[in-house]
Image: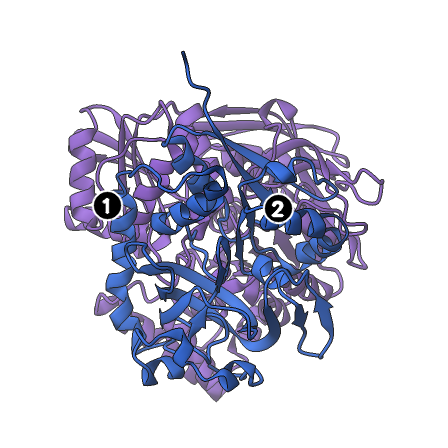
Amino acid sequence: MIRRTAAIWAGKATGALSRFSRRGGGTTLPGDVARVIDSDILRKLSQDLKYGAIVITGTNGKTTTARLISWLLEGAGHRVVSNRSGANLIFGVTAAALESANASGRLSADWGVFEIDEASLPKAIDEIQPKAALVLNLFRDQLDRYGELESIAKKIEAALANLPAGSTALLNADDPRVAEIGLNLTGPPLWFGLDDTTVAERELPHAADARTCPRCGASLIFDAVYVGHDGVYHCPNGDFERPPPDITAKNIKLDGFDNVAMTMHSTKAKQDQRIALPFGGLYNAYNVLAAYTAGITLGLDPGYIARRLQNFRAAFGRQERMEFRGRHLNLVLSKNPAGFNETLRTAVDLANGHNFLIALNDRKADGTDVSWIWDVDFERLKGKARALIPAGNRAHDLAVRFKYAGVGATPPETDPGKALDALVKATPEGETAHLLCTYTAMLDLRAELVRRGWAKPYWET
Amino acid sequence: MTRRKQTFTVGWLYPDLMNIYGDRGNILTLLKRAEWRDYDARLVELGRGTTQHMEDVDVFFFGGGQDREQALVYEDLLEHKQHPLERAVQAGAAVLAVCGGYQLLGHYYQTAEGERFPGIGLIDVRTEAGKKRFIGDVVVDTQIEDITPGTLVGFENHSGRTFLGPNASALGRVRLGFGNNGSDGTEGYLQGGVLGTYLHGSLLPKNPHLADYLIRSALRRRGVDELSPLDDSVELAAHARILERAPHAAHGRHASPALLQRPSHAPLESRPRSRADAPPPDQP
């Protein structure tokens, strides 16, 4: 008990110092400090949760989905602990739990909602012992840090096999690699998937990863492609197919970055639920469907979920709007080929965008290997982009990419302030500019905007 | 009289399975640079089971894949592609093989457990599994004569250690990064128009001079000796950005010890043979 209290106080003090000194949001360092003093601190704090926890993993959509689930639980009167800042390694999760612990070292909350980095999932499941584990998708991402998709998939599979009794795996049936994980589990998962071919593309994008049957190696046949390699698929030899989803999103309506609407259908519930949200993109339809599935699993009423979601606000920087010198800026995190292709598709085709700033950094959190930009279909910008600013510390690589995509761009601009100036200059007053950025490039741009007084620091949102 | 455009054909080996590191950039670069010179540029996709149009290919590209996909490709390569590929190379086609593709063109790949998977032996190299993964930016001083600049830049991510055989010559020497095996300072394989390397990034977009070298090698059999010049300022600016970073990293995370002892401009021949034949080290 003394050790636990010491760990919590040391962690809390570190967080306060870190915020006070403006070194950042104090989002992970307290976790590091506390775990040194008591390595079991997260396990102990998790046991304090009144109803338990849900962990969320996958390549894309973790933060938004975790926010959606917290939003649902909070609206129903629950006290929620969550790593809201997106610090999703085990230290960030520990730090979030510490932040909410009281002076006597107890966590007085009902639910924990934690987004977990794919590689940290085994440890997180072991320590948190969650009621549910949600896997959104598995795409190629940061190959320099994580290695290949296959090793990540195996880690997730091993982690899910260790879920405590009575815990449910919530899995995206549309993702062949996630489906394979689910079919290897002993307990039955709860499957979710999209069910609307009007929003599907016919061909797999260049960056598709899970293309072959896990049983016989044949190339999978896709009847619908929604996002990346997520879609409706089957093996030509009949060895593997998309598991029939328990909960589906049907009749999907997409309206740029402004709105997404869909009808939730559950094989078990009597009534369908129509849900509309004030943010956009087909990738967000997946996040909403996942959050709906989680909400039902955690015991919330379907009608309540639908009503509550209408007023959701997108997570920090995943999609943010701001006014800047007479232009509407739309900031969207785009960090890997699958994510980028979707934000591009939304910005160009659905939102009819003309003005773009694309920012690529190669710091550790972005991935130091930028090869993946060649898997993004920037060709989509051809004939559409009137302004295109290559930015970030790898702006020059983007400039080459745009040249070979046949899209005209201004000269590369590595300085965030100058890149913003170039964007304002190229964007007519009153028009919208879309800023698609990797993680730290987004932080750089946001810091510049904060410096100019236009957005709140991220730990205050 | 209108002149009919000459064709230029790129053959992409296993585009669906061997495309992990942005390899599409290499394909696009070859195609565009031929198009910009008024060739009718074509892409032939050589997936599993097909050998159609392999004899028409000017430049083959063979990229890296994930383990699962690489295992699927392996059988098909030995069964279907090996002989048509050998014939095409004898007839003067060029080849760019990266990472997994590079390894499969050699004599064999030996796993950590000592199991050997034979490659197609098109090039005189062999690969053994290593423990540590070599990851990061690479700058190479190339051995190719008459190309400007004399450097190649890219990104490597591999655990295999590749060693050149007695009849093989390297693509160049690493100034930054690990290269073939992290111990002898070499990177890649080069013989005429056949090129193997660990560099992706993608390789060709930021190395337009290497792309042109491959195109020129393949077109030589049709009597083309020179390509018309293009404006490469955008590509070379990106190339230069990586060179600028090189000195900082060279004293840091992944300079190879062999490299630090030897001036980077030392000719390849001065490399002691025995080094290349030594067993792969566990650590660079």
| Residue at (61% x, 31% y) in the render | A203
| Residue at (66% x, 65% y) in the render | A159
Residue B256 shows up from this direction: yes
C-alpha distance separating marks 1 and 2: 60 Å
Relative to A216, A340 lies left or right: left
Seen from the viewer's position, the closer of residues A309 and A176 is A176
What is the crowding at mark 1: few (fewer than 14 residues within 10 Å), some, or many (at least 20)?
some
From what the image shows, is residue A165 above or below residue A284? below
Chain identifier for the blue-coloured part of the image: B
Q: Colour of chain A?
A: purple
| Residue at (46% x, 31% y) in the render | A345
Q: Are marks 1 and 2 in contact (CB under 8 Å)?
A: no
Residue pointed to by mark 1: A455
| Residue at (29% x, 39% y) in the render | B229
Render colour scheme = by chain
Seen from the viewer's position, the closer of residues A289 and A256 is A256
Q: Position of residue A252 (x, y in %)?
A: 58, 25
Q: Position of residue B118 (x, y in %)?
A: 71, 66
Q: Using the rendered view, name the quadrant where residue B216 is placed.
A: top left
Which amino acid, mark 2? Ala
Tag nearer the camera, 1 or 2? 2
Residue pointed to by mark 2: B88
From what the image shows, is residue A74 above or below residue A322? below
Local SS, label 2: helix
Which chain's residue wears label 1? Answer: A
What is the crowding at mark 2: few (fewer than 14 residues within 10 Å), some, or many (at least 20)?
some
Relative to A363, A219 lies left or right: right
Relative to B165, A380 lies left or right: left
Residue A8 shows up from this direction: no
